[in-house]
Amino acid sequence: MVVAINGSWKTPIRNFMIHGLSGGGKANLVRMALCEVYDTGIIIPSITCDGHSYNFAMFNVIGAVLCPNNIETTFLHPFNPKIKIAVIFDIYHMMKLVRNTFASFGVMVNQKGEEIRWSCINELYLLHKHEGLRAGTKL
C-alpha cells in the first residue's frame, strides 16, 4: 500500500502471496515494488510495518541494520542509491508486543536488576475500573 505524505490518497500497488516466504524473498518483493513505484515518479521515503521477525529479516537483507548495538534504520533505494528509505515499525503494534510479552512473563527485570511486575499494572487497571477513572492508555 502506498500512502501519500503530502496528499490525501492511498492505493494498493499489488498483492503478493507471501506465506512461508523467506526474508530474502520478501526483500526482493520490496525492491521490485520500490522500483515499480519509482518508475511512476513517486519517491517512497519510508516503509512502515509491524514488528514480526520476518520483517526484521527482510530489512536486514535489504540493508537496514536492526541490531541493538549497530542500528542503521535506513537503506538505499534499489534503483536510485542517492535516496535513503527509512524503516519505521508501527508503534501501536510494538507496544502491543511489549504488553503481551510482559503479561505472559509476569515479571521483567530492568537494567538495575529491579523487578517490574505485571500484577502492578493489573492492580492499577482494577483500581481505575473500581474508581471510575479512565486512563488514556489501553492496558
Image (spheres, rainbow, N blue to C red):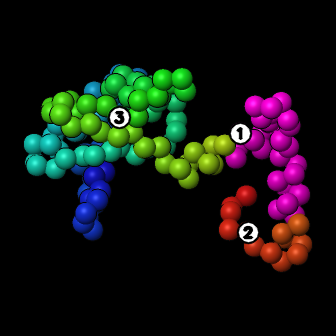
Residue 26: quadrant of the picture: top left
On the rendered structure, is 4 left or right of 61? left
Q: Nearer the viewer, residue 67 or 32?
A: 67
Tell me what residue is drawn at x 19 percent, y 47 percent.
43
The answer to whether the residues at label 2 and label 3 have Cβ atoms under 8 Å apart is no
Of discs 2 and 1, which sits in the foreground?
2
Q: Amino acid at mark 3?
A: Thr
Tag of residue 101? 1
Tell me the kind of residue under disc 1: Thr
> In the image, residue 133 lies at what x, y percent?
80, 75
Q: Is residue 120 visible?
A: yes
Q: Within 10 angstroms of label 2, few (less than 14), some, or many (20 or more) residues?
A: few
Q: Count residues near mark 3 (Cα–Cα under 10 Å), then give few for <14, some for 14-19, many for 20+.
A: many
Whichever of callouts 2 and 1 sits on the residue coming sooner in the sequence is 1
Q: Position of residue 89 (x, y in %)?
A: 47, 43
Give the mark nearest the N terminus, 3 or 1.
3
Q: Which residues are magenta?
A: 99-126
| Front in this rendered view, residue 105 or 67 | 67
**Residue 87 drawn at (x, y percent):** 39, 39
Question: Marks 3/1: CA distance?
Answer: 27 Å
Q: Which residue is mark 3?
A: 74
